[in-house]
Amino acid sequence: MKAIDGHTRTCGLIGNPVEHTLSPVIHNTLAELTNIGLCYVPFRVEEGQLEAAVKGAYALNLLGTNVTVPYKSDVIPFLKEIDPLAARIGAVNTLVRTEGGYKGYNTDMPGLYRAMCADGVKISGEKVLILGAGGVARAVTVLLLEKGAKEVILLNRTLEKAERIAQEVNVLAGRNFASAMANEDYGKLPADERYLVIQATSVGLHPHDEDVVIEDRSFYEKVHTGYDLIFNPARTKFMRLVEEQGGRAFNGAKMLLYQGIIAYELWTGTEVSEEQARLVAEAMQL
């Protein structure tokens, strides 16, 4: 690692909490691998201090920051500019320094797409089920629209939340692309259809390893590929149920890796190789 001196640039993470983050491992490892004088640290920002934090980061000449919960949408009014994809998603997780302020990007969804490509998961032309109807589910629905999925059905405990996302994305699409269904109504799906299913809730996150949105094994007969955005535990119950019914299953570890890599590339203008990505994953112990 390059010595920290007067030329070292600083990047960081804005959020609350930030103590659990793996982002410093990603970015400080990348700085070492690419021989760039950059140091990455987490910044816990208390409620009500977000605007001050963004202005302070700029005043202190920070090259950029990541933004995590609960500020991914709240940060938007404090940006000079926003990337079109981030605007459509309605969430920003990366700030890049520009003249007079920060430009906001969403690298979570490009990170998910890069991870799915690395895992050999196809989106174009696919019929996709999304479990959940929060901000992540909305972002995933927009990504699937952008990447040519055939249709999306959002399954959620509260049908109204899923319907709201479907309506918003259909306005973006200019057509009927997304629809909604209550979790318990999955039996109404065509019996002969198999889907790519993306698990976009926090259900099953450690320490609640044995929780799953839908328990019934008959649901998993409809899944040819399951993608759980959780990465801890590495093999969730959702993944086990998919595999037990003959499907392929993946976790969200590569999404975490690639969203960080894309942010680093935006900050530094470098291109991270797949070999470097593999070394970062080793450092993250994924």
Image: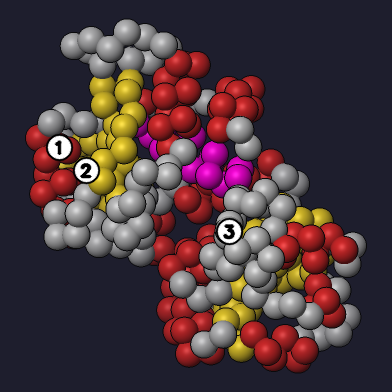
Label of residue 102 in the image: 2
The residue mark sitting in front, 3 or 1, is 3
Does the magenta run of residues contain 264? yes
Q: What's the distance in space between the residues labelled 1 and 2, CA to CA?
A: 8 Å
Compared with residue 34, is residue 250 higher up or lower down, i.e. above or below? below
**Residue 38: % across, % down:** 33, 21
The residue mark sitting in front, 2 or 3, is 3
**Residue 97: % across, % down:** 23, 36
Query: Closer to the camera, 223 or 267?
Result: 223
Q: Which image quadrant is residue 28 in?
A: top left
Label of residue 207 in the image: 3
Q: What's the distance in space between the residues labelled 3 and 1, CA to CA?
A: 37 Å
Left or right of 132, for residue 217: right
- Tell me if residue 53 can be seen: yes
**Residue 199: % across, % down:** 63, 66
Compared with residue 127, is residue 24 higher up or lower down, i.e. above or below? above
Q: Which of marks 3 and 1 is nearer the N terminus?
A: 1
- Identified by mark 1, the residue type is Tyr
- Identified by mark 2, the residue type is Tyr
**Which residues make up the magenta segment?**
253-267
Q: How crowded is mark 3: few (under 14 residues within 10 Å), some or many (20 or more)?
A: few
- Residue at point 25%, 30% (across, down): 63
Q: What's the distance in space between the residues labelled 2 and 3, CA to CA?
A: 36 Å
**Disc 1, SS:** helix
Label of residue 58 in the image: 1
Query: Closer to the camera, 258 or 124?
Result: 258
Q: How crowded is mark 2: few (under 14 residues within 10 Å), some or many (20 or more)?
A: many
The answer to the question of whether label 1 and label 2 lie on touching residues, with beta carbons closer than 8 A, is: yes
Q: Earlier in the sequence, mark 1 or mark 2?
A: 1
The answer to the question of whether label 3 and label 1 lie on touching residues, with beta carbons closer than 8 A, is: no
Q: Which image quadrant is residue 146 in?
A: bottom right
- Identified by mark 3, the residue type is Pro
